[in-house]
Amino acid sequence: MSDVNTFLSSAFTEQIKRLILGVEPVDAMRRSRIARPIELTLDGVPYPTGTVTKEEFDGTTDPLGYLSSIPRHSSCRHALVYPPDHASPIAIRLYDRTRRFVPRRISYAIPDAIETRSSTRVRRPALYPGAAYDVSVTATGMRGRVTWNQSDDDEVPARWVRVEAAIDGQIVGRAHGDDRGEFLLVLRNEAGGLGDLPSPLVADVTVYGPAGPQTVPDDDPLGDLPLEIVSADPDEVSDGETPPSGYAATAHSSRAVTFELGTLLTGQDKFFFNA
């Protein structure tokens, strides 16, 4: 009998698992790995034909549907090991059912040679604070809302927007909007520059979004979430700082906001896009 093992002799039974994609979700505000479990799955339509989930069987339907999860380890990292039916690129979804973080969809190109060690197999996508994020009571920032058109009658939320706050052209805070058109923007500690922070603190807040409202598929509540593509390194997508392709600001999605130090502003005038 010939020796078909890679590392051990044929006297042993050998099983090798090779990493095809490792994902370490990062908290964009705290700049550290996310300790609480989140959902990380392969991208796709959540309800394949003929599939009945446990939630549906129990009568407690999961609004996010069912997709193949990427296993999470106690290190807070997720690992997709090599099976023969996965090809490059691999698109994933990251979302938090409790709304602590805003969801993302990202497509990663994978090196062809699975036996080769490569840093491009490990990615650290950043997730930005959602409506239920554990934010400090002394944080400086704002809770905002974005819609399509200004009218309050039958207003349509602007989903999945990107937000930047700048002072003298320097970015001092970023946020991602959710499916309700809401965002949580927290300014960085260094927002006021060197020395004592000025009070009040005025920053230009700009909201970026697609050219018009996107259609939400009936079978996929996250189907209109932009798919961000990493085709090669350097990876300028995972950190979430670059808006998706086609995103832009309009005249009414940008304005100066006066922040109060140690205060999270609420009840602010909404931003809006002209469709």
Image (spheres, helix red, strand yellow):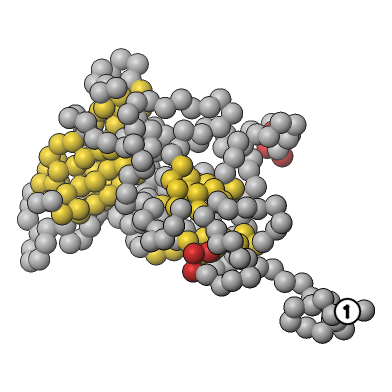
Along the horizontal axis of the image, is 105 left or right of 138?
right
Look at mark 1 in the image and give the residue it sits on: 2
Comparing 27 with 118, the one in front is 118
Query: Residue at the location (52% across, 60% down)?
Result: 23
Along the horizontal axis of the image, is 36 left or right of 61?
left
Q: Is residue 222 above or below residue 26?
A: above
Task: Quarter of the image for the N terminus: give it.
Answer: bottom right
Query: Residue at the location (22% across, 57% down)?
Result: 188
Query: Residue at the location (24% across, 52% down)?
Result: 173
Question: Where on the picture, by quarter, is residue 114?
Answer: bottom right
Comparing 235 with 42, the one in front is 235
Q: Is residue 163 above or below residue 5?
A: above
Q: Secondary structure at mark 1?
A: loop
Q: Is residue 96 visible?
A: no
Q: Position of residue 83 (x, y in %)?
A: 70, 58
Along the horizontal axis of the image, is 191 left or right of 81?
left
Question: Where on the picture, by quarter, is residue 13?
Answer: bottom right
Question: Where on the picture, by quarter, is residue 34?
Answer: bottom left
Q: Is residue 91 visible?
A: yes
Q: Crowding near pointer 1: few (<14 within 10 Å), some, many (20+)?
A: few
Amino acid of disc 1: Ser
Comparing 235 with 204, the one in front is 235
Task: Quarter of the image for the C terminus: give it.
Answer: top left
Q: Position of residue 146 (x, y in %)?
A: 29, 31
Query: Residue at the location (51% across, 34% down)?
Result: 223
Along the horizontal axis of the image, is 210 left or right of 110?
left
Q: Is residue 6 above or below residue 251?
A: below
Comparing 273 with 133, the one in front is 273
Q: Position of residue 96 (x, y in %)?
A: 49, 47
